[in-house]
Amino acid sequence: AENALPTAETVLLIAVIGDVHGAVASFAHGAAHAFSAGVPALIQVGDYWLYESRYARNKVDRTLESLAAEAGLGPDEIHLYFCDGNHEHFDTLDPDAAQPVPLSDHVTYVPRGVAVTIAEQRVGFCGGAESVDRARRTAGTVGHHRSPQLKRGHPGRGLIVQKDVQRAVVAVLAALDP
């Protein structure tokens, strides 16, 4: 049936990693745990920062490939999707883009309000969050607050990834409203 709930035999797992703030070692630690458990799909929920240079993107790809090989996963099996957080380089990322943005072989930025299929599950990304130190930040700089918006026509019906719980609940309810 179309609306049947997944079972243990049919569900494919997705690992969620949060707020690595550019620390490859922290990111690798989470990815290693996921891969060793046989989970090849990763979602990084904001404050990622590992996209600024080709060097950083290549280092993440090499790290993912190495960790996957250690866990018996092939390079074509693994992928990281990430949404922006409240501390990002918005001169590099465009949270209003209409489509996912591949940044390297294994990393894709998913802008706000965009949904993708990951591990056979539809996943909507909202990104952003209220920044507790917003009043001290300068507009247009790293970490300046940008409130998330769920775009009209969002395909809905699936998992909504967002860092701000209150807005996530509202977004999920909106996505489930036919």
Image: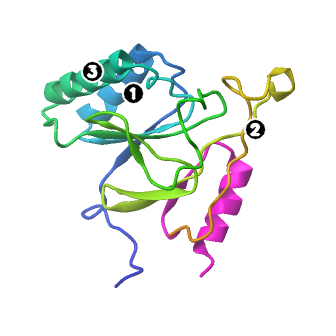
In primary-sequence order, the first of circles 3 and 2 is: 3
Judged from this view, the residue extending furthest toward the right is 135
What is the CA distance from the residue labelled 3 to the residue labelled 2?
Answer: 31 Å
Task: Give the answer, above or below, for where 6 lies relative to 34.
Answer: below
What is the CA distance from the residue labelled 2 to the residue labelled 1?
Answer: 24 Å
In the rendered image, which residue does mark 2 sit on?
130
**What x and y, as percent, mark residue 30?**
39, 27
Highlighted range, magenta: 156-178
In the rendered image, which residue does mark 1 sit on?
30
Left or right: 161 in relation to 143: left
Which quadrant holds residue 10? bottom left
What is the CA distance from the residue labelled 1 to the residue labelled 3?
Answer: 12 Å
Which amino acid type is shown beneath numbered disc 1? Gly
**What x and y, as percent, mark residue 8?**
30, 61
**What x and y, as percent, mark residue 123?**
45, 57
Per the image, label 3 sits on a secondary structure element best described as helix
In the rendered image, which residue does mark 3 sit on?
63
Task: Name the residue at 23% across, 21% down.
Answer: 62
In primary-sequence order, the first of circles 1 and 3 is: 1
Which amino acid type is shown beneath numbered disc 3? Thr
Which amino acid type is shown beneath numbered disc 2? Glu
Which quadrant holds residue 131? top right
Task: Name the residue at 74% across, 34% down.
Answer: 145
